[in-house]
């Protein structure tokens, strides 16, 4: 057998009271519908700013990620360039392969001087450069549009 809790009876009695009749319920519902218009207006004002902020965060985050990738790619290229059997083309291929393995395509690589002709203890510089517009996820980058990301690594040539 089901027993009612005393609070349930009190709630049922409140619905029957003169303070809570159909007119009062209608007034409450009409206040809610009037408030819906204010919520739509507030959303229309706040939404563009919010979406602009989110797109900006995505764009700057992608730029930071690509910058870190090209820093690491130049370091990998410099490590390869200082070995005894390295050539300029093999260094460029190593850097390009590293960048493409992490989905960064279109990297420009310069190696100076040519590792094949460099003497032992010469400094070899590997520079990587990419236009941010070619790696962004945003269709037309606003904040970072036209920026060129670049990184360099310098290491001494191995040998005797």
Image: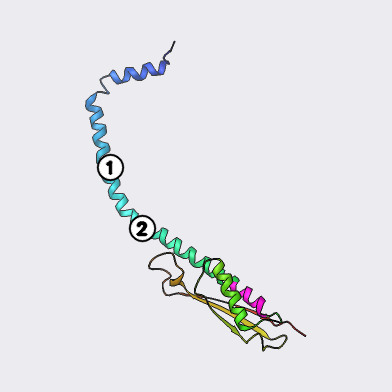
Within-10-Å neighbours for mark 1: few <14, some 14–19, many 20+: few
The residue at 52%/66% (across/down) is 103
User: Is there a contact, CB below 8 Å, between mark 1 and mark 2?
Assistant: no
User: What mark, if any, has residue 11 been given in the picture?
Assistant: none
Q: What secondary structure prevails in the magenta region?
A: helix
Q: Position of residue 75 (x, y in %)?
A: 63, 74
Q: Secondary structure at mark 2?
A: helix
Q: Position of residue 7 (x, y in %)?
A: 40, 18
The residue at 52%/75% (across/down) is 107
Residue most extreme to the top: 1
Residue most extreme to the left: 23
When the figure is inspected, residue 85 is found, relative to residue 73, above or below; the finding is below
- Tag 1 residue: 36
Q: Position of residue 105 (x, y in %)?
A: 50, 71
The residue closer to the viewer here, 22 or 81, is 81
Q: Where does the magenta region start and end?
A: 73-81
Residue 97 part of the magenta-drawn span: no
Q: Is residue 158 left or right of residue 50?
A: right
Q: Is residue 7 left or right of residue 65?
A: left
Instruction: Please state, as top left, top right, bottom left or bottom right, where the N terminus lies in the image.
Output: top left
The residue at 24%/27% (across/down) is 24
How far apart in space, not on screen, are marks 1 and 2 (Cα)? 21 Å
The residue at 41%/15% (across/down) is 6
- Tag 2 residue: 49
């Amino acid at each position: 057998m089901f027993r009612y809790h005393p609070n349930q009876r009190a709630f049922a009695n409140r619905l029957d009271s003169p303070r809570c009749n159909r007119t009062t319920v209608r007034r409450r519902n009409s206040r809610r519908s009037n408030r819906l218009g204010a919520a739509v207006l507030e959303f229309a004002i706040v939404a563009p700013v919010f979406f602009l902020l989110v797109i900006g965060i995505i764009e700057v985050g992608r730029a930071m990620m690509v910058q870190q990738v090209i820093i690491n790619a130049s370091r990998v290229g410099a490590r390869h360039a200082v070995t005894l059997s390295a050539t300029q083309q093999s260094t460029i291929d190593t850097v390009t392969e590293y960048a493409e393995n992490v989905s960064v395509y279109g990297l420009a690589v310069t190696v100076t001087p040519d590792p094949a002709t460099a003497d032992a203890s010469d400094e070899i510089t590997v520079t990587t450069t990419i236009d941010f517009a070619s790696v962004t996820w945003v269709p037309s980058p606003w904040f970072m549009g036209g920026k060129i990301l670049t990184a360099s690594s310098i290491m001494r040539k191995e040998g005797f």
